[in-house]
Amino acid sequence: MTTNEKILDFNDYKFLLDDIEQKLKDYIVKNFDIKDDNINLKYIHTSKVKLVNDTICESLNLEPRDFYLSGLIALFHDYSRFEQFKTYSTYSDLKSIDHANLAVQRLFDEGEFDNFVDNVSSEEKSLIYKAIKNHNKFAMDPDLTERELLFCNIIRDADKLDIFRILCEDPQCCDIEKGKLTEEELENFYNHKLYKKTTNVNFYNRALLHFSMIYDLNFKISFEIMFKEQYLKKYFYSLVLWANFKIGKKLMNCFDYIQDYIKEKIEE
């Protein structure tokens, strides 16, 4: 009898995920310089995303097998980040390569996924493939099924929440020009539109990009985590500390607006 044929509960799947996570960590430590702060950043991020992912799955009362599949997606969503930094010395997809596309290429087209996991069906592999490929996209594949969309939304939320944890420590505004917010950018923000990454980055539109990420959260628990951990407030305070100028009122108003938006989503 294979693992897939057994009736497993959450504890069984958590044990399996722990074992796979350790295999993945061993692979990273063996093949990349874990003492490099940039590599270590994504090493920690992977584990943190997995934990947030678990919390979201539990709040949705996913079946044990779906909990397991979602956990695999979380563990491997940034599989190619380490190779990306080793090769290009950057995590910017705009300046190097789309890390999600590279991940599914290596994991599934080249078969590296099978080095870590041996108990998923071809249909489940397809689900994992699509969730990883879509986790970083500005717009997801419009042909996703309802089930596929669920798993994509879970990993996208978990990923964003841990990105905010990282931003609280490093708001990523150092060494970029101050700039200013345009009326078009503000109008898009107040109309709940996401801000697409470009190479034309300044202090203000970088902050607005990060604020707008919150519009792309999908589950009540995600907003509750944002509020409980005070990620938005910590991030904004980090911006204030890093900036060598007084933060403009327009960005202050955006901060107040997105704070209220989080509270509204929690109360829905």
Image (cartoon, rainbow, N blue to C red):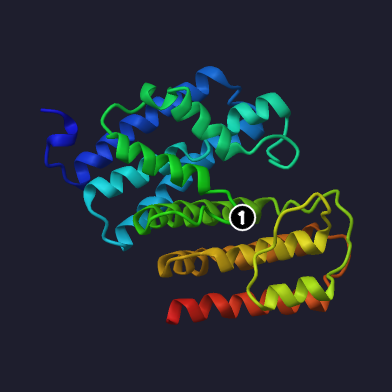
Q: Nearer the viewer, residue 128 or 15?
A: 128
Would residue 181 be found to the left or right of residue 70 on screen? right
Which residue sits at x=71%, y=41%?
Answer: 92
Numbered marks: total: 1
Q: Amino acid at mark 1?
A: Phe
Residue 257, located in which quarter of the rendered image? bottom right
Q: Nearer the viewer, residue 40 or 68?
A: 68
Q: Is residue 246 above or below residue 127?
A: below
Q: Secondary structure at mark 1?
A: loop
Which residue sits at x=61%, y=22%?
Answer: 33
Q: Position of residue 159 (x, y in %)?
A: 52, 51
Question: On the image, numbered disc 1 is attached to which residue?
Answer: 138
Is residue 198 at least partly visible in the picture? yes
Which residue sits at x=70%, y=73%?
Answer: 189
Residue 211, located in which quarter of the rendered image? bottom right
Which residue sits at x=61%, y=66%?
Answer: 232
Classify the position of the N terminus by image quarter.
Answer: top left
Q: Nearer the viewer, residue 109 or 252?
A: 109
Is residue 237 at least partly visible in the picture? no
Residue 215, located in which quarter of the rendered image? bottom right
